[in-house]
Image (spheres, grey):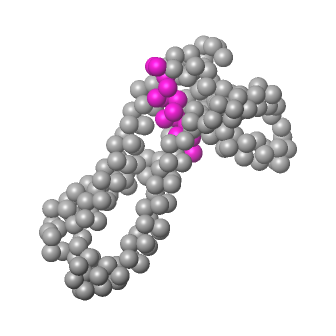
């Protein structure tokens, strides 16, 4: 390997470390955490969660409410006991048919509310989804204006590989967002009917 190539690798190593530590690792971790739901927990923890749901009693105490929120978060469930119970029972009623919906709803639990028997997504979630689609589209457009000689500012690193990596990442996020949205929209009416008919 030529001396200049070795020097270039030494110079760019800190840059790549920053990219990995500050951007890629948090994104991967956040993506992994968002995919984890009640249904991905170990069996014993699922049993503990069901036992907690059965014995839970609502309280007006702020400390008890805070404790309840922490516990439900640990079980990857909604704070609403009835809704969480309904999701688990809906899943068990027909796992093959209902599993995708239940997992999608729980993975989006931070952005979903359940009011008067209706599932609603928060405006913040729509804004996030919109931004992901916009960024993905802009990356595809930008790729057409980049060639092998384009570099990243003063770092003298080729821009093309980074743009391709970003396109792959945001394309995956876009597809994941669309998949979850469709899972919820196509099945939420059935789920709400399940709750209203008193199967629980």
Residue lying at 32% horizontally and 79% vertically, measured from the top left = 9
Name which quarter of the figure residue 72 lies in: top right
Q: Can residue 79 be seen?
A: no
x 23%, y 73%: residue: 158
Front-lying residue, 53 or 95: 95
Question: Which segment did they paint magenta?
Answer: 96-111
* 8 or 170: nearer the viewer: 8
Is residue 92 shown in magenta? Answer: no
Left or right of 142, for residue 88:
right
The percent coordinates of residue 16 (x first, y second) are: 38, 72
Residue lying at 70% horizontally and 29% vertically, measured from the top left: 47
Whether 162 is drawn above or below 173: the answer is: below
Q: Position of residue 53 (x, y in %)?
A: 74, 29
Locate the C terminus by quadrant. top right
Looking at this view, is 125 or 97 the one in front? 97
Residue drawn at (14%, 69%) of the image:
147
Q: Classify 101 as above or below 97.
A: below
Is 110 within the magenta?
yes
Residue 164 position within the rendered picture, expressed as x and y whole percent measured from the top left: 25, 60
The foreground one among 79 and 166 is: 166
């Amino acid at each position: 390997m030529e001396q200049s190539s070795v020097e270039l690798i030494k110079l760019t190593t800190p840059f790549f470390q920053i990219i990995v530590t500050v951007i890629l690792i948090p994104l991967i971790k956040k993506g992994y955490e968002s995919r984890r739901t009640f249904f991905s927990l170990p069996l014993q923890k699922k049993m503990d969660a069901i036992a907690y749901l059965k014995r839970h009693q609502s309280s007006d105490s702020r400390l008890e409410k805070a404790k309840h929120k922490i516990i439900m978060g640990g079980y990857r469930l909604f704070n609403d006991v009835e809704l969480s119970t309904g999701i688990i029972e809906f899943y068990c009623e027909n796992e093959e048919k209902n599993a995708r919906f239940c997992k999608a709803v729980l993975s989006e639990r931070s952005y979903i509310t359940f009011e008067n028997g209706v599932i609603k997504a928060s405006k913040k979630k729509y804004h996030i989804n919109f931004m992901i689609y916009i960024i993905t589209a802009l990356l595809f457009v930008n790729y057409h204006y980049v060639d092998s000689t384009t570099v990243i500012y003063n770092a003298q690193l080729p821009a093309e590989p980074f743009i391709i990596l970003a396109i792959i990442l945001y394309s995956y996020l876009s597809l994941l967002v669309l998949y979850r949205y469709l899972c919820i929209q196509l099945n939420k009416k059935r789920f709400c009917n399940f709750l209203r008919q008193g199967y629980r």
